[in-house]
Image: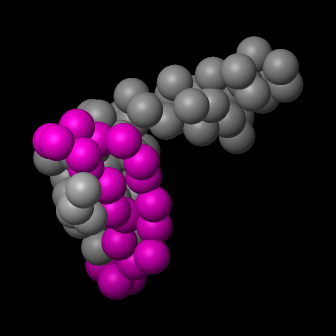
Amino acid sequence: MKLIRANIQDAKNLWKMQITAFQDLYAKYQDPETSPATETLEKTILRLKLENLMFSHRYNLARQEHLVVLGKD
């Protein structure tokens, strides 16, 4: 396993994983304004850009070239 710093090129994969991860909570609470399940790809990209500016980085934990876990420092 290796820890890999996420970048803008990872945005689409991160966004898809976020939607999947929060889909059940969205179905339960039906809150489109604040649910990460309804966030746009553009917002995910913007968040990644802002995190890089503020020296707060998102990381991917990869196992055999497959993304398995997300984290943030």
Residue drawn at the location 56% of the way across and 31% of the way down: 21
Q: Residue furthest bottom?
A: 55
Q: Is residue 53 left or right of residue 23?
A: left
Q: Is residue 19 left or right of residue 67?
A: right
Image x and y of residue 27, in percent? 75, 16
The magenta segment: 53-73
Image x and y of residue 33, in percent? 70, 34
As rendered, which of 21 and 35 lies closer to the eye? 21
As rendered, which of 47 and 16 lies closer to the eye? 16
Task: Name the colour scheme.
Answer: one colour
Q: Residue furthest right?
A: 29
Mark yes or no: residue 59 visible. yes
Residue drawn at the location 67% of the way across and 35% of the way down: 35
Q: Quadrant of the C terminus?
A: bottom left
Question: Is 17 rendered above or below residue 71?
Answer: above
Asked whether 37 falls inside the magenta stretch, the response is: no
Image x and y of residue 42, in percent? 34, 40
Q: Quadrant of residue 12?
A: top left
As rendered, which of 1 and 8 lies closer to the eye? 1
Q: Main secondary structure of the magenta part?
A: strand
